[in-house]
Image (tube, helix red, strand yellow):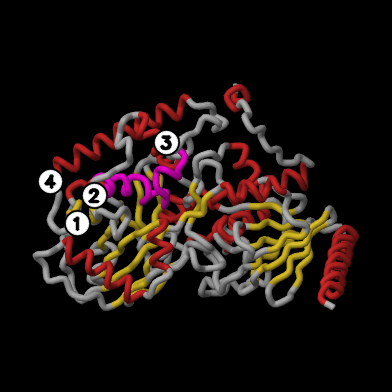
Amino acid sequence: MKPINSFVTAIAAVLVLIAAQHASLAAGRGPRVVIVGAGMSGISAGKRLWDAGVRDLLILEATDRIGGRMHKHNFSGVNVEIGANWVEGVNGDKINPIWPMVNDTLKLRNFYSDFDGVVSSVYKENGGLYDEEYVQKKMDRGDEVEELGGKLAAKMDPSGRDDISILAMQRIFNHQPNGPATPVDMALDYYRYDYEFAEPPRATSLQNTEPTATFADFGEDAHFVADQRGFETLVYHIAGQYLSTDNAGNIVDPRLKLNKVVREILYNRRGVVVTTEDNSTYSADFVIVSTSLGVLQSDLIQFKPQLPAWKIIAIYRFDMAVYTKIFLKFPRKFWPTGERKQFFVHASSRRGYYGMWQSFEEEYPGANVLLVTVTDQESRRIEQQPDNTTMAEAVAVLRRMFPGEDVPDATDIYVPRWWSNRFFKGSYSNWPIGVNRYEYDQLRAPVGRVYFTGEHTSEHYNGYVHGAYLAGLDSADILMNSIFNNVEFKVRGKYHDQTAEAK
């Protein structure tokens, strides 16, 4: 009986779709658009469509809130950011579009992150600091190689066909040709690359990270958001410009539906039908899918018919990285504080093992909270073990780093699990070696009436908040270009000559 039931259900969905489409045309109204996901990209796409006169919008969000991977969490009495935390790219020639909203409009508490102090705060695996001059020389050499890598990348074909990994670039310039071997070399290499891209140099594209467009375009500074309203306030601010809110600022608009887990998207040349886990169906002319890349790589949403092979291959060629911020509460401070002491590094013989630490004395005074960041394989390992095991491991590391201090047991811990969460399946995308502008175009390209957005579709700023914001605007523009101007999105050729086009 199951095949017959499935057939009947499919036919019914198609009939609903066709009827809704004809009703839309008969009424002479604008297009109806369903947006899947209420993170930064989905909300910014909705705002762009609304401003352009597309009024018939419906946003379906799987969780009980908006914001996606911008999410505050109350940890031991203070709201901390378990997802996006920084406005990265500030004080450059161009203005990061996120910065004026955060700093001027919303006036969210934020703090300049002084990473220069890292060289004076690299701790040996068994305690004590490395000599600052020794660390600085290694840091300077890393800076030199990174600059050489940027010059090499600039000489490569803009299409990306000549791209190599960051590790290959390091080998070319005889910088750790066999990879960093000593604990301090591994720690600094991790700080420079994994801490930013959440994957190691062997996996990360040179041409798409050297120089990193975010810093080259918007400036080298980074500001840490530590406002009790939460960084997600930014998403609510944008949403509130076209969705109804109550006096407290809560969104009460019926066009936003929370706890609606999309499981199926049926599409054809007439329109789309979106089905949620509670068996609700929503018909529309178009759908914009703003889920994470990790969700696209999972089986959460079934597309019918199946997405074409070129689209599926593009989705799987990009990496969904995992970046885990572990929060630890202590009864008292035992770590150094003050100028140039905001960040400190554990130089382990095991790459990325509780390596990057951050104190919060300025951001959350008196909270006695430390943050340690892990990524990639360590993130996946830690997500699968009990929190008390993670707490014991982290405290053991601190006791080795500070052998002369009476390091107490931690009293609380919070471990975000972005990779295990079926609504995210990771933290943010990383551009891997072997993927060029052609695959990027395929990743963001629509399939019929199904459009795609998300930080992973931002050509220059993937992985960043501003990338998610701009991607939403870009995807909405692609849709509107098709609707109003009859201009379809074109995927550039595999080895498209962008230099000639620019001329």
Residue 347 or 20: which is nearer the viewer?
347
Question: Mark 3 is on which residue type?
Answer: Glu
Residue identifier under label 1: 125
Residue 364: give x, y in percent of width and height.
28, 67
The answer to which image quadrant residue 502 occupies is top right
- Secondary element type, mark 4: loop
Residue identifier under label 2: 183
- Mark 4 neighbour density, 10 Å: few (under 14) some (14–19) many (20 or more): few
- Secondary element type, mark 3: loop
- Which quarter shows the N terminus? bottom right
Question: Mark 1 is on which residue type?
Answer: Glu
Question: Mark 2 is on which residue type?
Answer: Pro
Q: CA distance from mark 4 to mark 2?
A: 14 Å
- The stretch in magenta equals 185-205
Q: CA distance from mark 4 to mark 1?
A: 14 Å
Q: CA distance from mark 2 to mark 1?
A: 8 Å
Residue 227 or 385: which is nearer the viewer?
385
Residue at 79 percent across and 65 percent down: it is 283
The answer to which image quadrant residue 36 occupies is bottom right
- Mark 2 neighbour density, 10 Å: few (under 14) some (14–19) many (20 or more): some
| Mark in the foreground, 1 or 3 | 1
Residue 162: give x, y in percent of width and height.
52, 29
Disc ID at residue 131: 4
Q: CA distance from mark 3 to mark 2?
A: 24 Å
Residue at 44 percent across and 39 percent down: it is 209
- Secondary element type, mark 2: helix
